[in-house]
Image (cartoon, helix red, strand yellow):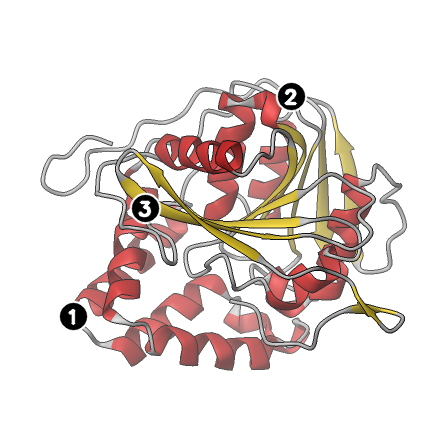
Amino acid sequence: MPLSSPPTTVGSQPSHRPELVRRHRWDGLRCESRLVRATAPRLRPLLLIGGAFQSKETWGRCEKLFLTNMDVFTVDPPGWGAADPLPPGRSVDVLADAVCHILDESGLRQVNVVGGSYGSAIAYRIAQRHPERVGRMVLVGTMAAIPEHSRDAMHRALALLDAGRMDEYAHASVDILMNTGRLDGITNGSRVRRFLLRRLAALSRAEAVQVSTNTLRLLHHAELDTSVPVPAPTLTATGEHDAFTTPAQCRRMAQACGRGWFAEVADSDHMLFLERPVEITDLVTRFLADEPLHALPYCTRVEQLHPRTLPGPRAVGPMPGGKPV
């Protein structure tokens, strides 16, 4: 849910052409896509897959900045934005396959991929299940599974959401997503927090159902199988103060990739795309262009990691009602 910003321009000319929105169907479910073509792309098209509160239209300033170098393709797979709800019990693999179907119908054979938060799990499974589709990949605020320290807090937040106590729900959710103890050290931290509180308190009923279903899916699905390396060159990144998907967790995901890099961005936490949009789009663009990442002034740490064989996924119990995951 990026903050609003003016269009990016190159000189006096817009950096992109008008958007093209298309409807798709996957497994009987309606999905949508949105393609914005750059006027002078130098990199392959970029697929953006957002987090639990994002839709294909909500990349804001980051999208505008990416369009100076590449076409941008955003999606509403089942359970997101304008798409149909994804029934409980369907796994992240269904979302990965749905996104590849959307790419097929849009004539995009291979793309670079950026996945943020929840979207990073979808991106990761695309790279594992359909490796020929992914040139390079960036996972921002990523994790193999919901961290144990967040599970109880997420269940409490969902209980508030289901009860319609929206202001309390908003505060509980933002306290998970943002490191409230470090707001003074986070770029735009107070402003981003106020924005998120307003946005989450104003969720429509349909959005609330999407958020509840998708969050339960994350809480109850099996951990991502990091024992199977991802062949695409992959960068994982997060803010230095991220207490939700911590730098250690993101670094571990990078180690699971055959060619993995890890970057820690200064003065930020989990909400990198909102807090430091200029810096994160610069970092992503440099990586996608295979440019050096060392000595970037906004990173506290950048590492190229040796691949490491990690154990298979830890099983998670069935969803409430006994439905399989």
Question: How far across and down, in percent of the image, does residue 287 sit?
Answer: 78, 42
Tag 2: residue type? Pro
Q: CA distance from mark 3 to mark 2?
A: 31 Å
> How many numbered marks does the figure carry?
3
Q: Secondary structure at mark 1?
A: loop
- Above or below — where is 150 with respect to 189? above
Seen from the viewer's position, the closer of residues 190 and 290 is 290
Residue found at x 36% / y 57%: 82
Q: Determine which quarter of the picture holds residue 249.
A: top right
Q: CA distance from mark 1 to mark 2?
A: 44 Å
Amino acid type of the residue tagged 3 in the rendering? Arg
Amino acid type at image mark 1: Ala
Q: Nearer the viewer, mark 3 or mark 1?
A: 3
Q: Is residue 122 visible?
A: yes
Residue 143 visible to an observer of this rendering: no
| Rendering coords of residue 207 (x, y %) | 30, 64
